[in-house]
Amino acid sequence: MEVGWRSRFPYSMVWVCLSFFWRMRGGGSRSMYSMGVIGISQAHLIRQILKMLKISIIGCGNIGSFLLKSVKNKILECEVVSVLDKDVERVEKLRRELNMKFNIARNINELIKNSNLVVEAASQDAVREYSAEILESGCSLMIMSVGALVDNEFFNRLRDICIRRNVKIYIPSGAVAGIDGLKAARLSRINSVSMTTRKNPRALNLPDSSKKIVYEGSAGEGIKKFPENVNVAATVSMAGIGIENTKLRIISDPEINDNVHEIHVYWDFGEFKIKMKNLPSKENPKTSFIAALSAIAMLKRISEPVEIGT
Ligand SMILES: NC(=O)c1ccc[n+]([C@@H]2O[C@H](COP(=O)([O-])OP(=O)(O)OC[C@H]3O[C@@H](n4cnc5c(N)ncnc54)[C@H](O)[C@@H]3O)[C@@H](O)[C@H]2O)c1
């Protein structure tokens, strides 16, 4: 990643040297010297993060290929090291079309070599199959197929690896907004979270019948019944009051083409309602275009020096 000469110039080092020699000659103060040392470590840390974002991607379908295009077009500044997809021809075609130089990984060891963050944009099965090994290797992991994490035992196992290996799991907001509000409200007390998802039956893999409620109950059960469609319910549950307490309703509606998610939160100091009306991606009607953008926004947040939002 290109870092300008101004940010590379070691101002803090100059400060430390000057204050050190000044102190040797009997002037200056210890705090001036310390300020320089702190300056060095902060500048060093920021530079490390900026330079170090080397990602590998599992899955180059709708979200994964959009990520690659964003790197190619410099919307996202990082290095793509490797891509793994069970459909190898798809990766080869994409690499040719984009004229990029990433490796095509044939297994997880090849994928994680030389990268420090893996982005999963494949399936819940891929999360279950690869996550532990990725984290154990010292790579952080961004997960799009969040539904896989509603299995408590699995989630806790990954969490333990993160603590032991000093790595992180990143979960983008995906196709919903309002995660920041939920995370803040949770620090007080949330009384209820209810979510309604409306999609065309085509996106839900259902026959094209009249408008009807196809699921009503806990988010946990809903995620199991519609694993490719309600990753958002998993993200909302994890940020809020958990899969058992979050209420989910899924409506199949042949008259709409958008993916609509409504979230209603009551908490001790008020309530908020969020309605997202997302256009689906052309390649995959189940996936809202904003989900791919959300992954990019999170990668930018990880790599940029200023963070906005909770
Ligand atoms: N968090 C969210 O809000 C959100 C929103 C939309 C989609 N998603 C999820 O993100 C994931 C990717 O979505 P997409 O629209 O890009 O899907 P997609 O079907 O367009 O692409 C998935 C790609 O991953 C590959 N793949 C699947 N399983 C694999 C495995 N085990 N190993 C290697 N490659 C594998 C497939 O061959 C395909 O190329 C899906 O699981 C989807 O449910 C999450």
Image (cartoon, helix red, strand yellow):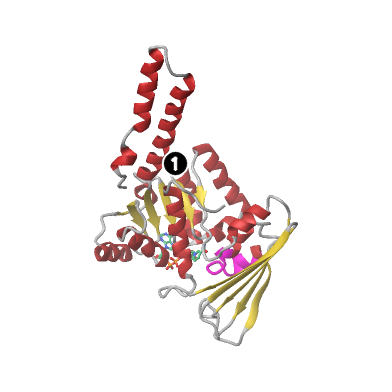
Mark 1: few/some/many CA within 10 Å (<14, 14-19, 20+): some
Q: Is residue 20 above or below residue 310?
A: above
Does 224 appear in magenta? yes
Q: Position of residue 1 (x, y in %)?
A: 32, 47
Judge left or right: residue 214 versus residue 270: left
Q: Nearer the viewer, residue 277 or 113?
A: 277
Magenta stretch containing residue 306, yes or no? no
Residue found 59% across the figure and 59% down from its top: 179
Write the residue at 43% across / 46% down. 305
Location of residue 190 by image quarter: bottom right
* Placement of 30 over or under 203, stated as above or below: above
Q: Amino acid at mark 1?
A: Gly
The image position of residue 215, as x and y in percent, is 65, 74
Report the span colored magenta: 221-232
194 w.r.t. 301: above or below: below
Secondary structure beneath label 1: loop
Q: Is residue 266 visible?
A: no
